[in-house]
Image: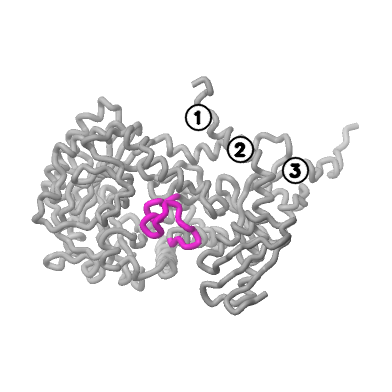
Amino acid sequence: MARFLTADAFEVPEKRLQHLPFRFERRGGNYLLSNMVGDFVVLTHDEFGRLVDLRVTPGDGLYEKAYAAHLITRRGQQAQHQLLALRLRSRMAFLRQMTPLHLFVVTLRCEHSCPYCQVSRQSTDRSRYDMSEETAQRALKIALDSPSARIKIEFQGGEPLLNFGLIEKIVLAAKAAAPASGKKLDFVIASNLALLTDEHLIFCKAHDVQLSTSLDGPADLHNKNRPRPGGNSHELAVKGIRRAREFLGSDRVGALMTTTERSLDRVAEIIDEYLRLELDGIFLRPLSPYGFAVKTKQFHRYGVKRWLDFYTRGLRYILAVNRAGRHFPEFYSALILRRMLTDRPIGYVDLRSPAGIGLGALVYNYDGRVFASDEGRMLAEMGDNTFKLGHVDTASYSSLILSDKLINLIASSLTQCAPECSDCVFEPHCGADPVYHHATQRDPVGIKPLSEFCARQKGVMSLLLDILNNEPENAAILRRWGGM
Amino acid sequence: METAVGISIDFDAATQSLSALNAAAYRLVGTAACKIDKRGAHYVCRLTPAGQLDGDSLRYRFLELVTDENVRENLSAKTEPVRNLILSLAFGSLAAPSSQ
């Protein structure tokens, strides 16, 4: 007669178990661990000790927890290796789409005088700061030579509407050339919308061009941050947003805010302004260390601790809005959550390793210089050409991307190899920012214990993890943002 | 040992790796500076706090960091073969054949 075997027959001798690669750090009295693809698990001090020593047995709870989190495996077992490899490959698949983003700086002229301006804009009467048609055509050829099946052409400035005639020519030329290169195209204009006319809107509608603008909060805050002659930046931005949403569609217009010192105590008002204008969400952005933000000392006005406090209060306020029934994500949190909760390949250029410089985006300046990123262009306006790759007159896509300069910058900043990053529990969801670290520490890797970028990333991810683990109602909202 | 401007901690060089000490010292950058010397069979770590951290707290923190780095080194050595296996399964097909 058949009998069931006793539980002893299923015990796994310690020597049959082995560790899979994982990272850890202390969190209060506990340990936070992550596996090779960034799945998190929290263990007590005792559990961590038992895991390290492989003192685990099927049925003890810890064995199951560690096995499910791919922290341990049985010798001779291959399924977990295959699964981790598959997930890793999925997460890195963004590398198959090379340089999907191309920024055209069509002019450096702008009629605003924002003290935190990152691009060192020039006043409006200096027309030598406009991109020429010849430069634009050469840049377009380089963009269409990128292997990516779908590219986004983003028009930047200064204020790009001041050179709208060139935007029209680039869009039409790109659409004419795209079928031959087999590419799909997306277009965006990053504009303050103060100069938006019906002519602009008609063109954007006809050619499916999206608009992205700046909205720093309620009128007094926005106008203080973004002065222009007449002092009516907010009024014009709001008018432009409403007109554009009505004419192009609500999903064709987005807004970004920049956090200045004045913003820090007003996060709820800033969010309320976005809600009032029925925008789809908000991106709580810190100030960057480039351009006029450094020159006017705006960048040094607050540190990462104050920004994290701002972000935390903002996120809590937004979660309350969502709990009340309105879907309104914080976009940076949503991006991080997609990284943490799914294996979808996310090539967001500012948060990936290998870094997004060149591989994720190329920037064609008004004068024909080509930069590895928009921030690299901003550094050049401050006299630092570290991230200049070439010139449209002499370069090709291959020569730019395969340049020793770019390869060395990317290779030296890989988080998978960098000190402290390579052991960090958050590394699978983080990224390299060689431009930021060069700007702040004169080194593309940076000393991470001193890096405000690092502190910001850890702060955001820690908060999101804390909510996911301990606040069920808010966790459900975060999961929706993450696409689950 | 606590000096007027920092503390010293000794480690037995026979059982404590230099690389783990260096990694722990790196994590302390910004909190304390660490100078590591070899004296006979010992590594001597001299820690100078950057801020208000007192000697006992600094010692405790550094010892925790060293303990963690030792665990990391141990785990890394044990898991390196399987890590390389997983990476080769994930990306090995992208490598060009040696004949090319």
Residue reaching furthest to the top: B99
Question: Quick check: A3 left or right of A401?
Answer: right
Magenta-tinted stretch = A432-452
Residue reaching furthest to the right: A1
Chain for mark 2? Answer: B
* Amino acid type at mark 2: Asn
Q: Which residue is rendered at x = 26% and y = 67% of the image? A: A296
Residue picked out by circle 2: B84
Q: Element at badge 1?
A: helix
Residue A327 seen: no
Gap in angstroms between the C-alphas marked 1 and 2: 15 Å
* Amino acid type at mark 3: Leu
Q: Which one is in front, A433 or A101?
A: A433
Chain for mark 3? Answer: A
Q: Using the rendered view, name the quadrant where residue A398 is placed.
A: top left
Q: Element at badge 2?
A: helix
Q: 10 Å neighbourhood of mark 3: few (<14), some, or many (≥20)?
A: some
